[in-house]
Image: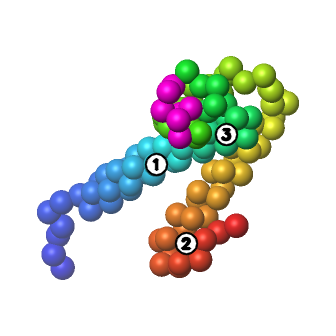
Amino acid sequence: MTKLLWDEQHLRELERSRKQTALDAQIEEDWQTASRGTHRLRSEEERGPTRCANRQCRRLRRCVPAVPICVHRLPLQLPPGLEQKVTEDYYTKLQLLRRAMARGSTERPR
């Protein structure tokens, strides 16, 4: 019987830790994407781009920057919890899309 000359358990734990760190970063980015998407949808529904300080938004009639700057100036404020619900729905759709892409499916989730 041969003796291992390296710590196999340590190497497995190190790899697991690296994967978890990458997953955590992806999850955080996905939540930020969902939040930006929620703000963009809200802004566009309230015609925020037509009143936006950004000339490019006004010209294209849609939110251009990563974070809509006009969303906080809109007259309509969402009831507490509704923005979180919409963001969670957006995040769920994003995760379903990621899963479908990983499985090689061409069908878009609803």
Rendered image quadrant of residue 41: top right
- Disc 1: which residue: 26
Task: Check the image and report above or below for 107 versus 47.
Answer: below
Q: Secondary structure at mark 1?
A: helix
Q: Position of residue 44 (x, y in %)?
A: 67, 39
Task: Check the image and report above or below for 20 versus 4.
Answer: above
Nearer to the camera, 21 or 28: 28
Q: Earlier in the sequence, mark 3 or mark 2?
A: 3
Q: Secondary structure at mark 2?
A: helix
Q: Kindly identify the amino acid type of the residue bearing the numbered disc 3.
A: Glu
Q: Going 35% across and 50% down the picture, which residue do you hit?
A: 18
- Disc 3: which residue: 44
Q: Going 14% across and 63% down the picture, which residue do you hit?
A: 5
Q: Position of residue 31 (x, y in %)?
A: 57, 43
Highlighted magenta segment, given as a residue range: 54-60
Q: Is residue 76 left or right of residue 6?
A: right
Rendered image quadrant of residue 73: top right
Q: Kindly identify the amino acid type of the residue bearing the numbered disc 2.
A: Ala
Q: Kindly identify the amino acid type of the residue bearing the numbered disc 1.
A: Gln
**Disc on res. 37:** none
- Disc 2: which residue: 100
| Mark 1 and mark 2 residues within 8 Å of each other at the beta carbon | no
Q: Secondary structure at mark 3?
A: helix
Q: Earlier in the sequence, mark 1 or mark 3?
A: 1
**Residue 55 shows up from this direction:** yes
Badge 2 density bin: few <14, some 14–19, many ≥20, Cα 10 Å: some
